[in-house]
């Protein structure tokens, strides 16, 4: 998790935590609601839920302490200016300085007066529902007094307070795209995640509120730009009205796809000038590359990323859509493992959950269930064998409780497995199956000890990914979809 890839979010970029510094054009996205700057196995501070960050053209989200001259009395102000510059949002006039700004079509005059309000709704001039372009949200709100404070994230040895501000999300008073001239396209990439249909639905509905009529879905991610057998899917409120009642993606998903140049060629041929990309790390790397290619060609296209990772492992984000649903659904698997283990003689239930680089699902599902005895996550190193090993503790649990439940994140324990250096179509390292490995090692260990056990292994990954979003994620998806559209039309949005 030492490097981040570039990612575009709602006309901005969001930094992804990733253990590879290579940018691969394919796979997933990120989200708009940012709250907590996460780091492995360390608590962090909060920011407002209506904020945005941008990390295009950077490879790290914070300047390392070694690169700061702390002897310079101005180091703090320089750091703050550098942070502001690295997280500034691309401006449409950066490429098209003569771009015309028009009054937002998102305003109260679209709504009919109602008798519930004396005199009807307030006039547009009296409505203060727009976000000012200069609005900022404080990223970190805790002033740590010491580097030894729990969760402290310090830049200098004295743990000085350094302000870090990021742009606030929401509709602006001026926009730079005329809705009647917009052709908007939506794609979903990578793997499935609860809430994909919810985000698609609210992007479409919000586009129509702004007055956009030409909306299409590109089937099966970036692949849909090159496969001649895949045709655009017309989208409207009528089409998407009930899609949030089902899991999966209305548009389908895939990894990989054509070259960046081919994708931009296809955008021009189709007349698409607004592209909403739902996906993860690789997908956002691809979106960023598309953005750069469009800027190079000086064509007016907004590329908007909606972050998608069920693992909840994006820097600066408190929660990504699908995560709450995954934790809730994981309870079923953990409960089944507990019942199996508790009902068997020397029963051991092993549950493997999602979490390539961050074990948030495994950790929170374990805490919520109250039935897990051992939780193994990528952020915390551990031993399997030896006096302080997992297997020794498992033996203690069997001797004292008679049964045990283990929950592991998929990325945990990779140091015990043979590395292949293989990559999937999204550029992610192909992980070894630690769930199966610990199952086998557990059986081997207790056989050597001549202790009979009954191991039950459960991997509910694809069952969890395919369910519909719960209420909490549904609300988050609503905000993400609405703000994605607001930032695609406004002044502060990356232009391709």
Image (cartoon, grey):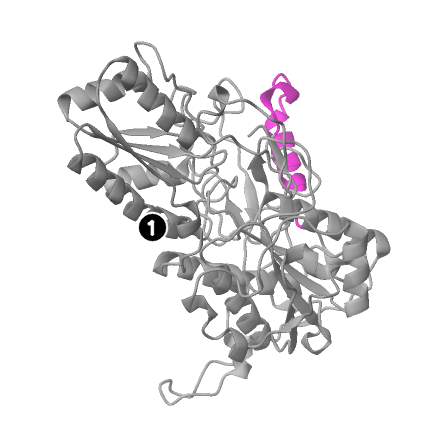
Location of residue 176 in the rendering, given as x and y in whole percent from the top left corner: 71, 67
Secondary structure under tag 1 reads helix
Position above or below: 462 against 116: above
The residue wearing badge 1 is 329
Image quarter (top left, top right, bottom left or bottom right) of the N terminus = top right
| 451 sits to left or right of 148 | left
Which residue sits at x=54%, y=22%?
418
Q: Residue furthest top?
A: 387
Q: Residue furthest right?
A: 297
**What segment carries the magenta color?**
63-89
Question: Measuring 66% from the left and 39% from the top, which residue is drawn there?
Answer: 86
**Image-based side of 119 in relation to 164, left or right:** left
The spot of residue 194 in percent (x, y) is 44, 56
Observer able to see residue 42: no
Q: Reply above or below: 250 against 404.
A: below
Is 86 a magenta residue? yes
Rendered position, 250 above or below 62: below
At horizontal 41% and vertical 48% (from top left) the residue drawn is 323
Left or right: 132, with 139 as reference point: right
Query: In the image shown, does 69 or 111 lie closer to the viewer?
Result: 111
Q: Does residue 229 appear in this view?
A: yes
Image quadrant in which you'd find residue 203: bottom right
Using the rendered view, name the quadrant where residue 376 is placed: top left
Q: Position of residue 233 (x, y in %)?
A: 63, 72
| Screen quadrant of the C terminus | bottom right
Rendering coords of residue 55 (x, y %): 64, 42
**Magenta run includes residue 412:** no
Q: Residues within 10 Å of mark 1 (few under 14, many from 20)?
A: some
| Apparent side of residue 114 relative to residue 375 in the rendered image (left or right) | right
Number of marks in the image? Answer: 1
Q: Nearer the viewer, residue 388 or 128?
A: 388
């Amino acid at each position: 998790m030492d490097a981040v890839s570039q990612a575009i979010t709602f006309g901005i970029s969001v930094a992804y935590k990733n253990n590879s510094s290579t940018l691969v054009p394919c796979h997933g996205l990120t989200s708009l609601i940012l709250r907590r700057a996460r780091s492995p196995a360390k608590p962090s501070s909060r920011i407002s839920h209506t904020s945005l960050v941008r990390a295009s053209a950077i490879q790290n989200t914070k300047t390392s302490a070694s690169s700061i001259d702390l002897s310079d009395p101005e180091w703090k102000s320089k750091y703050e200016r550098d942070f502001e510059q690295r997280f500034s949002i691309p401006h449409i006039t950066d490429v098209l300085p003569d771009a015309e700004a028009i009054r937002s079509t998102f305003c109260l005059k679209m709504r009919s007066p109602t008798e519930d309000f004396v005199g009807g709704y307030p006039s547009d001039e009296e409505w203060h529902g727009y976000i000012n372009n200069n609005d900022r949200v404080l990223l970190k709100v805790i002033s740590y007094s010491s580097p030894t404070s729990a969760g402290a994230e310090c830049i200098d040895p004295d743990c000085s307070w350094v302000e870090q501000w990021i742009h606030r999300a929401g509709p602006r008073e001026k926009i730079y795209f005329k809705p009647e001239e917009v052709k908007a396209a939506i794609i979903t990439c990578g793997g499935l995640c609860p809430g994909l249909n919810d985000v698609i639905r609210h992007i479409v509905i919000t586009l129509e509120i702004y007055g956009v009529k030409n909306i299409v879905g590109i089937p099966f991610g970036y692949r849909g730009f090159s496969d001649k057998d895949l045709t655009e899917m017309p989208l409207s409120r009528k089409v998407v009205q009930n899609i949030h009642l089902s899991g999966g993606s209305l548009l389908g998903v895939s990894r990989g796809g054509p070259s960046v140049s081919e994708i931009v060629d296809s955008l021009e041929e189709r007349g698409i000038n607004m592209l909403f990309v739902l996906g993860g790390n690789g997908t956002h790397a691809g979106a960023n590359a598309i953005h750069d290619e469009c800027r190079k060609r000086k064509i007016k296209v907004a590329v908007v990323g909606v972050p998608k990772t069920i693992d909840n492992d994006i820097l600066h984000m408190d929660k990504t859509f699908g995560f709450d649903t995954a934790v809730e659904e994981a309870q079923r698997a953990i409960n089944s493992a507990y019942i199996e283990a508790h009902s068997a003689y020397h029963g051991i239930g092993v549950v493997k959950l999602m979490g390539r680089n961050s074990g948030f699902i495994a950790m929170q599902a374990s805490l919520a269930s109250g039935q897990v005895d051992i939780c193994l996550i990528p952020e915390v190193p551990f031993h399997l064998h030896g006096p302080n090993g997992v297997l020794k503790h498992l033996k203690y649990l069997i001797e004292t409780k008679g049964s045990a439940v283990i929950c592991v994140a998929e990325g945990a324990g990779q140091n015990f497995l043979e590395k292949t250096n293989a990559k999937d179509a999204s550029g992610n390292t192909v992980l070894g199956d630690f769930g199966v490995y610990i199952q086998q090692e557990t059986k081997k260990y207790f056989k050597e000890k001549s202790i009979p056990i009954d191991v039950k292994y459960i991997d509910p990954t694809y069952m969890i990914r395919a369910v519909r979003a719960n209420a909490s994620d549904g609300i988050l998806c609503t905000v993400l979809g609405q703000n994605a559209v607001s930032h695609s039309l406004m002044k502060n949005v990356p232009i391709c």
